[in-house]
Amino acid sequence: MKRIAVKIGSNVLTRKDGTLDITRMSAITDQVAELHKRGWEVILISSGAHHQGGA
């Protein structure tokens, strides 16, 4: 199995007003699912949860 690490920053996951960009998150999820289907192990690294105050 091939492995890839993808870092996604807070600015990618949020809108200008600071709210989560659900549409973009859905698109990223679809892309990760497609990579997984093609035999890739995807390691997603994000600082977005920290930006929203989550742990």
Image (cartoon, helix red, strand yellow):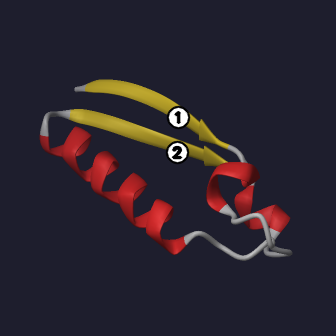
> Mark 1 or 2 closer to N-term?
1
* Image location (x, y in percent) of residue 5: 50, 31
Please state if 51 lies on the left or on the right of 44 as rendered: right
Q: In what quadrant of the picture does the N terminus appear? A: top left
* Image location (x, y in percent) of residue 54: 79, 75
Please state if 51 lies on the left or on the right of 34 as rendered: right
Give yes or no for contact between labels 1 and 2 (Cβ–Cβ under 8 Å).
Answer: yes
- Residue designated by label 1: 6
Name the residue furthest top: 2
- Residue designated by label 2: 44
Indicate the amino acid at tag 1: Val
In this rendering, the answer to whether 3 lies above or below 33 is above
* Image location (x, y in percent) of residue 11: 73, 51
* Image location (x, y in percent) of residue 36: 23, 43
In this rendering, the answer to whether 3 lies above or below 38 is above
Closest to the observer, 18 or 10? 18
Closest to the observer, 8 or 42? 8
Q: Is residue 55 visible?
A: no
